[in-house]
Image (tube, rainbow, N blue to C red):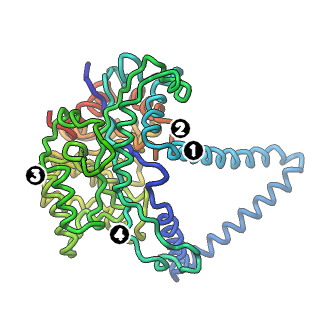
Amino acid sequence: MEAKAAYDVHLHAFNLSHPSLSTFARRALRELAAQLLRPRHLPIALLVLVLAAGLILLGALLLLVYWLAPLRRLARSLIHAVIGRIKHLLQRFANLLLVLENDIGSTFLLMENCLRDPENPLLDAAGVHLGDACYERLVLTPLMMDFGYKSKTAPGTEVPRKWFRYDIPAGKPIVEQVVDVFRAIRVYAETESSEKLTAKYPALDPTTKRVFEIYPFLGLNPANYTLAKIEGLLEKYFAHYSGRRADYLAQYAHFDGNIDHLGGHVFAGIKVYPPLGFDPWPAGDRTAMAKIERLYDTCSTKGIPLITHGGKGGFVTVDRERLRRITDVSKWEQALKRYPDLRIDLAHFPMGRIESTRQQHSLSLVLEYENVYVDLSCRATSDDYYQRLRALLDRLPVEDAETLRCRILFGSDFAVNLMWIESYNRYLDLFSRTEALTPAEKHAFCSVNPERFLFRV
């Protein structure tokens, strides 16, 4: 089994300068205050206070019995378990921050260095080893996120002004992220292995060559733009869209630092993110619908891939009720009824029992529409996910199982997934080693299906 390229269709390329962190903090404070102060939630608030008091008393009791010989060992083990869990979470969070503090070009080099880890190399002179196959290249499609500024409310309206002295939201225009990402691609592609580079990235010895091809997705939230602006963006970046990988490769790493010089075949598709306020089908709002229809009409007609965040988690800036509405899979069902040819990836395909309804709804769209896909990003942080996927494939009717096999895409959600797994290498290694999938399924998920989703030959 041979193939030229493997794919990671879902990861991110941003650092701490790009997200609007204050927006997330304000939203969290607003939601906490709103939920606790609602009359129907007062019993819950009281229960939280009682539980907090109980935990304090329990902690005091543990400290007391710690010195009593018969209970000392039990108390010590409980305290160590709690401290160990907290330490583990802090280590994961610190690991993520260490990545996000890098410029994006350095992050790409860090990822390659990780795959070449001599203790468990997935990448060597022959290529990337996943399952039983070896791939010459690893194609990355980092998904930009339109953190935006225009959709934020005026200072002092989300949280009482007295809470903050400098309650003026920082502007986070996506243009800055675009410039940083394309500059990073050029830096990565032109960085030659050397002794100096090896000093920083020990696995990148002077004989190694770059293995990634990087084709970003444009992050777009139509709510942040006028209809004319959206039409201008689609015209600039997708007017001559062909979907051919060769056309993207011809433009690869040619960015000169001037965003006005970016043209077609630089973005492999478009990324939308409901928790940031994107409504997939804003029925009843004529202005919003006009912009959504323009986006979907272009993507449907030209075959431009769309990737949407799946689920209610992630970078959330909208209130709880709006989040529930715009992240419901039924929104995409409405869109697909009007635009059945939309090529879309419903990301983060769930396998847990809690999200069984979302899984079934996503699966029904995969089975009904030939261009609907799902991906494994951020979910597959343990082999349990693949075991559940195996069980799902085995219990589906044969024809449905085969359809799903042809619509699953491999993605990592790096670097966000570092909150649940220790490294990029480990995430790919779990996929490579799992016995829940056959070699043919692994090849389909990381190579055949993504290539069909992203490119037209």
Disc on the earlier residue, 1 or 4: 1
Q: Look at discs 2 and 4 and give the one toward the viewer.
A: 4
Disc on the earlier residue, 2 or 3: 3
Q: Which residue is mark 4?
A: 150
Kindly check if marks 3 and 1 are in contact, taking CB atoms under 8 A apart as contact: no
Query: What residue lies at 34% left-to-right and 65% top-to-bottom?
Result: 277
The amino acid on which the numbered mark 2 sits, given as a three-letter code, is Glu
Q: Which residue is mark 3?
A: 301
Query: What residue lies at 26% left-to-right and 19% top-to-bottom?
Result: 2
The amino acid on which the numbered mark 4 sits, given as a three-letter code, is Lys
How many neighbours does mark 3 have within 10 angstroms: few (below 14), some (14-19), or many (20 or more)? few
Query: What residue lies at 48% left-to-right and 69% top-to-bottom?
Result: 27
Q: Look at discs 3 and 4 and give the one toward the viewer.
A: 4
Q: Is residue 75 left or right of residue 408?
A: right
Q: Secondary structure at mark 2?
A: loop
Kindly check if marks 2 and 3 are in contact, taking CB atoms under 8 A apart as contact: no
Q: Look at discs 1 and 4 and give the one toward the viewer.
A: 4
Q: Is residue 300 left or right of residue 78?
A: left
Q: Which residue is mark 2?
A: 422
